[in-house]
Amino acid sequence: MSGYGADAAASRWEISSDLVFSVTTPGREPVQGRVSASGPTVTVATDDPVAVWEAATGGAAAGDALLRVVAGQLHEQGITLAVSGPGGTVATVGAGVDSSLGRLATGSRHVRLGRPAAVAPLARARALSLVQAHRSEVYAGAAALATLAALALWRRASLGA
């Protein structure tokens, strides 16, 4: 399968589409969006990028690994994917993207994050999923801090008396 490098793919891909979609995730109202493409650029626009991401990936842990793979494959194929929400562009992924911040945040240089206002809903959802996934550790840490604080207060009271 020759011709799959970025140079060959850039001249090979001429995508043209306009697709309206709807996704439903548990506990949420259905979310609509639009996928449009022209040449090697695909754009996904939705009012709720968090719901679309969760529906597409099945969750945060799976989503992180999937994003790295998809970003690399899109880059190799010469395709750029732009995702936008109410706050603007959430991320641009694939060809023509080389971001140090994207590598720190996602593990792939081929992901460029959008403005903070656009990325904030995904960041909040990610933080919430991490807390929920590690709830027992969070509770144990809070209990340990409360115990240390109580011991410090008891010691101070016993030394001062």
Image (cartoon, rainbow, N blue to C red):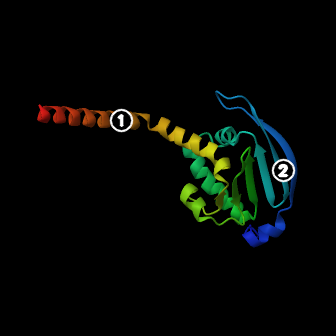
Disc nearest the viewer among 1 and 2? 1
Q: Quadrant of residue 15?
A: bottom right
Residue ID for mark 2: 36
* Viewer-side residue, 75 vs 34: 34
Is residue 119 among the parts visible in the rendering? Answer: yes
Quadrant where the image shows the N terminus: bottom right
The residue sitting at the front extreme is 160
Q: CA distance from mark 1 to mark 2?
A: 47 Å
Looking at the image, residue 63 sits to the left or right of residue 93; the answer is left
* Viewer-side residue, 144 vs 14: 144
Question: SS class of the residue under badge 1?
Answer: helix
In x, y percent, where is residue 3? 76, 70
Q: For mark 1, does the 10 Å Cα neighbourhood hold few (<14), some (14 to 19), or many (20 or more) residues?
A: few
Quadrant where the image shows the C terminus: top left
* Viewer-side residue, 154 vs 62: 154
Is residue 2 among the parts visible in the rendering? Answer: no
Question: What residue sits 83% from the left and 69% below the top?
Answer: 11
In x, y percent, where is residue 82? 74, 54
Question: What residue sits 21% from the left and 34% below the top?
Answer: 151
Looking at the image, residue 104 sits to the left or right of residue 82; the answer is left
Q: Amino acid at mark 1?
A: Ala
The residue sitting at the bottom extreme is 7
In x, y percent, where is residue 119? 64, 49
Residue ID for mark 1: 142
Q: Earlier in the sequence, mark 1 or mark 2?
A: 2
Give the vertical position of 19 relative to 132 (above or below): below
Question: SS class of the residue under badge 2?
Answer: strand
Check contact, mark 1 vs mark 2: CB within 8 A: no
User: How many numbered marks does the figure carry?
Assistant: 2
In x, y percent, where is residue 54? 64, 39
